[in-house]
Image (tube, coloured by chain):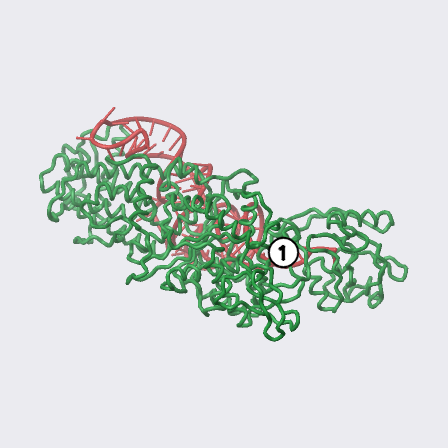
Chain colours: A green, B red
RNA sequence: GGCCCCAUAGUCUAGUGGUUAAAACGACUCGUUUACACCGAGUAGUCGGCAGUUCGAUUCUGCCUGGGGCCACCA
């Protein structure tokens, strides 16, 4: 007898799948390959509900394709080379990365990851994600570092990477440059202070939110159309407190409506300052250090915040403030530190993207985006790009940039491919021209520079049996501008191809329509749901919204899933208790044949829906068919025949039950893999050859003689049954109450082939012809 | 300020240029004990607002309102 506990069921089949290597990718396959560029989750604790939601959705597709006869390439990776991992390791091991050598720290990371990753991945296995977990990569392991460095070298040699001294977006907390894609907007309340500058002993009021940058003030811009300041253009202004002279320049960027209409340019207050300095060839003055401190004589060593307060205090004491008001404005912060970013000139490495916008847009058009409108987000991002992709990070932990710099001749030396992966700080390089020792690059690559190579990394694990373009990239919409975009960049630059033919963008999970966040405390842990209701119930829930839509988490939806699982288990048990399988395919009773004809309609519809990634419709239609058509009606209709019918009648019903239930199970197999495997193994395995339902063939239409009238007959019999039930319900009578049924001549004609079963299921004692009527 | 998405029953989600807009949960009225009370039958209840296109709009278009996202601005 079947197990009724989901934990027992899941444990059994997880082990079975693993032992029998059901989801193993066969490199020697002759089948067509369906390849999935599966997202490597960041190792930073546990799987969250958003993961469960989106991975379940991609697994539906993987399992469907597998049953359709594809050799599915579905690797599993973990992303563990970035800042989150660095932080995690520091916390777990009570160390500071800066206190260890890079090699020591990476070794510690690799060692720690080895300890914690299996437990982390177990959540994915428990959810029934059908990856081949033996095709595993980590974005920091030796093979990945090698590939990442190799690709860096190729890009450099193809003149697509350059090193530049340039004011870049800088985070003072982690002391590293960051990319445009890593910025977030934050609403902040700030003091907007109007300060007295002096020109010819007259006061020129200037409003600013960053008075601490007065020491780096290079010029004042006024709009050429601004009558108030027109005469000042070309003159010099005196910077308050610092008393140095700066030019007053004409620039239409100065907005007459904003502040006082006159604008101070500092190096560097914002992105525009960077352009302004370049445009007017001003000499930059850098007064902020990499760790966010001031280095002007006046405020030496103070943090930006302290310097701002002290400056305002000094201005106030010298009567240099005209006006002060609190304003709310949005500022750019680094998403990981939540601190306002600065612009600091440092030497960094960049991948060229600004001059490739058109090609990148073109690549995007070659990919099928699901849902379609997500392509717009990709395009908007490209159109708005203003910086090349900054790929170097001044971190300890990461893939080292495999380069040295010869100070004598200013030449950049790269590692030989044969010595990869390499940490340049561990190896001496002699410049061939100067015969002197070159300086190793200490920076590491941005995580995205490596994770944008997941297709190539995963392919390398198959001896390149799998190549790009992959069939599918599933991912979240929040990383279109990063992961999707950068992967497209890399595939274009390295192989002049698109990385995948399809990209499926999943939505996120909300709770009470609000985004979940740890700080709000409104987080649902999938581990608890898995424990309480099981993986199938959670997956069933994940199938109840369409691709790309956000979904609100409601426990009742999980419970609905759980009910479905019980129902299908019960129905299967019932079928097999009563089953009386003939040796050969029996002649079918008309009711049975017509029912199978209905099933064929379902199969057809499900197939077209699954092809379009409409797993939602697949679930909805299959569920409706199973619950209403199969369980509530077909089973009721044939009960009498199964209990009291003759051999021929029983055999027809048994045969029909067998193939219809098996078909239904297969349709559900991608969505609820555990329960369907349980039922398959318990009841069907002795008749079927497949080792697992997940390796069985996806249902095709059942070979029967379909008749055009079938659907009408089926609809009519259900309609009559429903009407009879309604009458009985209204009369508050049992469904078993005997009746006298009157059918119209036409109804009788339509129902002729199934009349006997209709009489049995409605418990009709007498059948009359005339106006439709039910007598109790 | 620009762009994108969303708005359907009490709740959460489907869907459609045309009979009566579809499930689930919830509510209400009942029934049932030879698969299933984690069950069955039935009842009530819904297309944000305004205009346009159309014989006909919940569906297409525009505007508005509300919610979400992205970008720009951010002196």
At a point 53% along the width and 44% down the height, the residue shown is A515
The percent position of residue A385, horizontal first and vertical second, equals 58, 63
- Residue A388 vs residue A57, the one in the foreground: A388
In the displayed structure image, the side of residue A394 where residue A20 appears, left or right: left
How many numbered circles does the render carry?
A: 1
At a point 68% along the width and 50% down the height, the residue shown is A329
Q: Chain of mark 1?
A: A
Q: Quadrant of residue A564?
A: top left
Q: Quadrant of the C terminus of chain A?
A: top left
Q: Is residue B44 depicted above or below B3 in this figure?
A: above
The percent position of residue A34, horizontal first and vertical second, equals 35, 59
Q: Which residue sits furthest left? A: A647
- Residue B75 vs residue A488, the one in the foreground: A488
The percent position of residue A647, horizontal first and vertical second, equals 9, 40
The percent position of residue A502, horizontal first and vertical second, equals 41, 60
Residue A719 shows up from this direction: yes
- Residue B42 vs residue A588, the one in the foreground: A588
Q: Which residue sits furthest right? A: A201
Q: Quadrant of the N terminus of chain A?
A: top left
- Residue B56 vs residue A372, the one in the foreground: A372
Residue A776 shows up from this direction: no
Q: Which residue is mark 1?
A: A176
Helix, strand or loop status at disc 1: strand
Q: Is residue A35 depicted above or below A659 in this figure?
A: below
In the displayed structure image, the side of residue B36 where residue A167 appears, left or right: right
Q: Quadrant of residue A168?
A: bottom right
Tag 1: Cα neighbours inside 10 Å, few (<14), some, or many (≥20)? some
Q: Is residue A59 depicted above or below A281 in this figure?
A: above
């Amino acid at each position: 007898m079947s197990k009724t506990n989901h934990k027992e069921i899941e444990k059994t089949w997880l082990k079975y799948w693993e032992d029998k290597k059901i989801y193993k990718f066969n490199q020697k396959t002759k089948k067509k390959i369906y390849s999935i560029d599966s997202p490597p989750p960041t190792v930073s604790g546990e799987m969250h509900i958003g993961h469960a939601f989106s991975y379940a959705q991609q697994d539906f597709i993987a399992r469907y394709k597998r049953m359709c006869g594809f050799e599915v390439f579905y690797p599993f990776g973990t992303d563990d080379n970035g800042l989150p991992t660095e932080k995690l390791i520091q916390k777990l091991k009570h160390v500071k990365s800066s206190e260890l050598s890079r090699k020591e720290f990476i070794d510690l990371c690799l060692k720690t990851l080895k300890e914690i990753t299996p437990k982390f991945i177990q959540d994915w296995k428990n959810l029934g994600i059908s990856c081949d977990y033996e095709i595993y990569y980590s974005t920091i392991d030796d093979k990945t570092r090698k590939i990442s460095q190799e690709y860096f070298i190729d890009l450099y040699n193809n003149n697509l990477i350059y090193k530049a001294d340039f004011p870049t977006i800088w985070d003072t907390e982690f002391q590293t440059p960051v990319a445009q894609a890593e910025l977030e907007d934050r609403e902040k309340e700030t003091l907007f202070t109007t300060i007295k500058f002096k020109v010819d002993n007259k006061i020129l009021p200037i409003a600013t939110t960053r008075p601490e940058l007065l020491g780096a003030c290079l010029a004042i811009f006024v709009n050429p159309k601004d009558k108030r300041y027109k005469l000042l253009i070309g003159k010099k202004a005196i910077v308050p407190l610092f008393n140095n002279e700066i030019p007053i320049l004409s620039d239409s960027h100065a907005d007459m409506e904003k502040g006082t209409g006159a604008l101070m340019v500092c190096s560097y207050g914002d992105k525009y300052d960077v352009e302004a300095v370049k445009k007017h060839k001003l000499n930059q003055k850098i007064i902020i250090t990499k760790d966010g401190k001031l280095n002007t004589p006046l405020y030496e060593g103070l943090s930006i915040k302290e310097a701002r307060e002290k400056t305002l205090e000094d201005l106030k004491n010298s009567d240099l403030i005209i006006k002060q008001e609190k304003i709310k404005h949005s500022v750019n912060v680094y998403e990981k530190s939540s601190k306002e970013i600065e612009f600091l000139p440092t030497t960094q490495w960049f991948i060229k993207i600004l001059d490739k916008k058109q090609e990148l847009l073109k690549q995007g058009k070659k990919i099928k985006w699901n849902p379609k409108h997500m392509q717009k987000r990709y395009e908007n991002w490209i159109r708005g790009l203003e910086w090349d992709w900054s790929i170097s990070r001044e971190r300890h932990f990461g893939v080292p940039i495999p380069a040295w710099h010869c100070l004598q001749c200013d030449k950049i030396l790269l590692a030989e491919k044969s010595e990869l992966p390499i940490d340049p700080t561990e190896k001496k390089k002699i410049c061939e021209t100067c015969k002197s020792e070159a300086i190793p690059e200490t920076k590491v690559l941005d995580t995205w520079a490596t994770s944008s190579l997941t297709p190539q990394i995963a392919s390398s694990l198959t001896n390149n049996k799998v190549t790009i373009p992959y069939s599918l990239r599933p991912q979240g919409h929040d990383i279109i501008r990063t992961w999707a975009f950068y992967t497209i960049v890399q595939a274009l630059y390295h192989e002049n191809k698109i990385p995948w033919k399809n990209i499926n963008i999943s939505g996120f999970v909300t709770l009470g329509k609000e985004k979940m966040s740890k700080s709000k405390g409104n987080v649902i842990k999938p581990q608890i749901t898995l424990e309480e209701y099981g993986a199938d119930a959670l997956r069933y829930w994940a199938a109840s919204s369409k691709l790309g839509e956000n979904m609100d988490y409601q426990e009742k939806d999980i419970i609905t899933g759980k009910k479905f699982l019980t129902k299908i288990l019960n129905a299967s048990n019932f079928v097999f208790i009563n089953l009386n399988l003939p040796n050969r395919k029996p002649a079918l009773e008309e009711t049975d044949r017509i029912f199978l004809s209905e099933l064929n309609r379902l199969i057809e519809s499900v197939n077209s829906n699954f092809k379009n990634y409409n797993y939602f419709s697949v679930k909805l239609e299959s569920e409706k068919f199973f619950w209403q058509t199969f369980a509530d009606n077909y089973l009721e209709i044939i009960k009498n025949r199964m209990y009291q019918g003759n051999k021929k009648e029983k055999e027809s019903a048994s045969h029909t039950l067998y193939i219809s239930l098996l078909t239904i199970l297969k349709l559900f197999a991608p969505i609820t893999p555990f329960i369907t495997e349980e039922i398959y193994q318990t009841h069907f395995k002795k008749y079927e050859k497949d080792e697992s339902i997940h390796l069985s063939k996806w249902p095709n239409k059942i070979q029967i003689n379909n008749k055009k009238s079938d659907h009408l007959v089926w609809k009519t019999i259900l309609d009559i049954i429903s009407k009879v039930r309604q009458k009985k319900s209204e009369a508050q009578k049992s469904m078993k109450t005997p009746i006298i049924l009157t059918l119209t001549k036409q109804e009788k004609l339509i129902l002729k082939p199934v009349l006997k079963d209709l009489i049995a299921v409605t418990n009709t004692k007498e059948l009359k012809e005339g106006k439709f009527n039910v007598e109790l």
